[in-house]
Image (cartoon, rainbow, N blue to C red):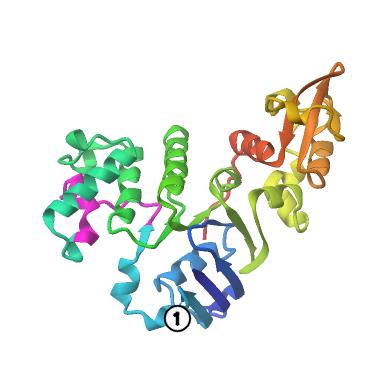
Amino acid sequence: MIKFENVSKRYEDGTVAVNSLNLEIKQGEFFVFIGPSGCGKTTTLKMINRLIPLSDGTIFIDGKKINAYDIHELRWNIGYVLQQIALFPHMTIEQNITVVPEMKKWPKEKMKQRAYELMNMVGLDPENYADRKPNELSGGEQQRIGVIRALAADPEIILMDEPFSALDPISREKLQDDMIDLKRNLKKTTVFVTHDMQEALKLADRICMMKDGEIVQVGTPQELVTNPANDFVREFVGGKFGNWPNHIDLEAMVQPLASSEMHPSIVIPVSTSFSELLTLLSVHEQLVVENDGKQIGVINRQTLIQFLSAHMPERGMTDE
């Protein structure tokens, strides 16, 4: 779907923001770029829709070089959500949502239907919200409009640059849940930039960890947690897991046992330390937890990711 071949970005002062990036993002994938400030993740995102020109290499979308697309055609087929919500203050919410469809000369009734459909999708009643102005909405509601505005013209690709980082924790969690629903229902190819590992673990199909303009590791959330490529990834994911007490109550993680899972070969006591749990899950897909000789449930890699995404302290890094 989106392919990077030896992509680099150098600035006139000699700064190398991205260095020889080779990567492929799959159709319908929710792909997250993460890393410390200045690692090149936002630069990489902005090169996809030519907001930042490449210095070297090529980016392909559906096998076609991005420079071969008409710039308007390219951007009309790529939704873009910024950290700064940037709704037009003088327009109604419905008008804000339908900006691109109107530029593409959609019929009025089709635009209205699409706006109402999308508002319903994120839990905003069109009858109550369509005619409001942005200043009548909360920050979380405005950002939900920002997200669905990017979806309005049914683009193939959605780019999201730290879209939730300025929101309060409750609004942020609600929007993350909205994104999971949209991901499941719409199956759009989504490229998402964040500095928050908790957010990445919760949302991503795959994560690209970057440092100094280069890829350090690409993998599923499970792979980054259980098989970090090096100490940098290990520390970024969990500070060598030093932020976690070594004796976490594993009962908070267990899922119910199915009858087919009784008496498995790998059984661990509920007193197992967190570091031991990580080591075991790097080798085994699933473990059964035992307390006082009784099997109380299972922990697998997905269970671990869900627990981490719900409880991991945010990595407080700012973007470039």
Res 88 visible: no
Horizontal side of 81 relative to 215 (left or right) equals left
Residue 90 on the magenta span: yes
Residue furthest to the left in view is 108
Tell me the quarter of the picture where residue 41 sits: bottom right
Query: Quadrant of residue 77 in the image?
Result: bottom left
Name the residue at the front extreme.
Answer: 260
Name the foreground residue: 304 vs 131. 304
Q: Is residue 204 left or right of residue 99?
A: right
Q: Position of residue 289 (x, y in %)?
A: 79, 27
Q: Please indicate whether residue 258 sits to the left or right of residue 84 in the image.
A: right
Q: In the shown orientation, is residue 308 left or right of residue 102?
A: right
Residue located 80% across and 37% down the image = 277
Q: Is residue 51 magenta?
A: no
Residue at horizontal 49 percent and vertical 62 percent from the top: 27
Q: Secondary structure at mark 1?
A: strand
Where residue 146 sits: x, y (%)?
32, 49
Task: Please state which of residues 81 and 262 is positioned toward the viewer in this rendering.
Answer: 262
Mark 1, residue position: 65
Q: Looking at the image, can residue 220 be seen?
A: yes
Task: Identify which amino acid the numbered label 1 is placed on.
Answer: Lys
Please state the horizontal and vertical placement of residue 151, each as a whole percent of the image: 33, 54
Q: Which residues are magenta?
A: 81-101
Position of residue 39 measured from the top left corner of the image (x, y, whole percent): 59, 63
Residue located 72% across and 45% down the image: 239
